[in-house]
Structure formats: C-alpha cells, structure tokens
Amino acid sequence: MTSNEILSCTPNEDVVTKSMYRFKVWNLLENKDLVRFPRPCKGRIPNFVDCVVAAEKLSSLEIFKKAEIIKVNIDKPQESVRFTVLEEGKTLLVPMPGLTDGLVMKVSPPRDASRPLLRMACK
C-alpha cells in the first residue's frame, strides 16, 4: 500500500485491523493538536508532542535495558530514541534513507563520546 492509498482510504469500522487503529491514532493526534511538523500525520510516523518523553520511558523497559543492538527508523519523531540508544552505549542500526530493504548503517558509540557528538550521530 502506498502513502497515497493510505491517505485516500477509509477504514472499515466493522473489521478490526492495524489500519483502523492507525486511523484512530492519526485522527486523535490531529484533532487534539498533538502533532508537530510535518502535518497532516496520516500515512507517516507522527512527530507527536512529547516524543522525547516517550523515548525516555522506552529506556526504562527491561527489554531495552537487556538489548545490545537496537534498530530504529530514520524518521524525525524517532530521533530521540536514536539518541537514547547511543547515550546508553548500545549499538544503533538505522535503515539507509530511500531504501525499502537491505542495507542498514551501524553506529557503535565510543565510550567517551560527548552528548553533542551523540546528538549529531543520530540526526
């Protein structure tokens, strides 16, 4: 399904699907003005208000603590997650921009890396 198809279709309320939940979340975020640029958020990972707080909460999960390598998408809303992964000294895997599958970039932070350097590495 392409982005244009996602934007133009309407979910069937009688059938519980992943698409239905996406539409509900996208609509809620837009209606409550909880989304930052780019808008509208339909058809993409929303850049929502407090995505930084969500990234911080993610780092408190046991599965995050145990992981040594974490893959995070390149989308802007997940920038804080990428930073958190590097800040915690974990190896970050990031898909290559523009490719749908295949190659990923591997970022392994040095132990003495400064916060500004880690921030630049996850942009």
Image (spheres, rainbow, N blue to C red):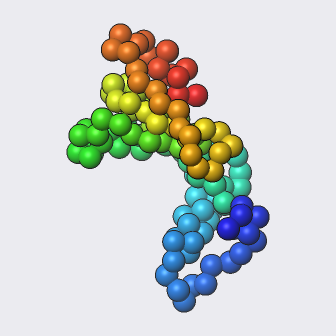
Q: Kindly identify the residue that appears in the image at 47 percent across and 30 percent down.
A: 106
Q: Is 122 placed above or below 70 here?
A: above
Across and down, in percent, residue 57 comes to: 34, 42
Q: Is 116 placed above or below 90 here?
A: above
| Circle count | 0
Could you say which quadrant of the image residue 58 lies in? top left
The outermost residue toward the bottom is 14
- Quadrant in which the C terminus is drawn: top right
Across and down, in percent, residue 12 comes to: 61, 84
Q: Kindly identify the residue that appears in the image at 60 percent across and 69 percent down.
A: 23
Q: Is 68 placed above or below 30 here?
A: above
Residue 37 seen: no
- Seen in the image, is 108 located left or right of residue 105? left
- Quadrant in which the N terminus is drawn: bottom right
Across and down, in percent, residue 95 comes to: 56, 41
Q: Kindly identify the residue that appears in the image at 71 percent across and 55 percent down.
A: 40
The outermost residue toward the front is 102
Judge by depth and name the residue closer to the eye, 97 or 41: 97
Residue 5 seen: yes
Across and down, in percent, residue 73 comes to: 53, 43
Could you say which quadrant of the image residue 108 lies in? top left
Q: Kindly identify the residue that appears in the image at 60 percent across and 38 percent down.
A: 96
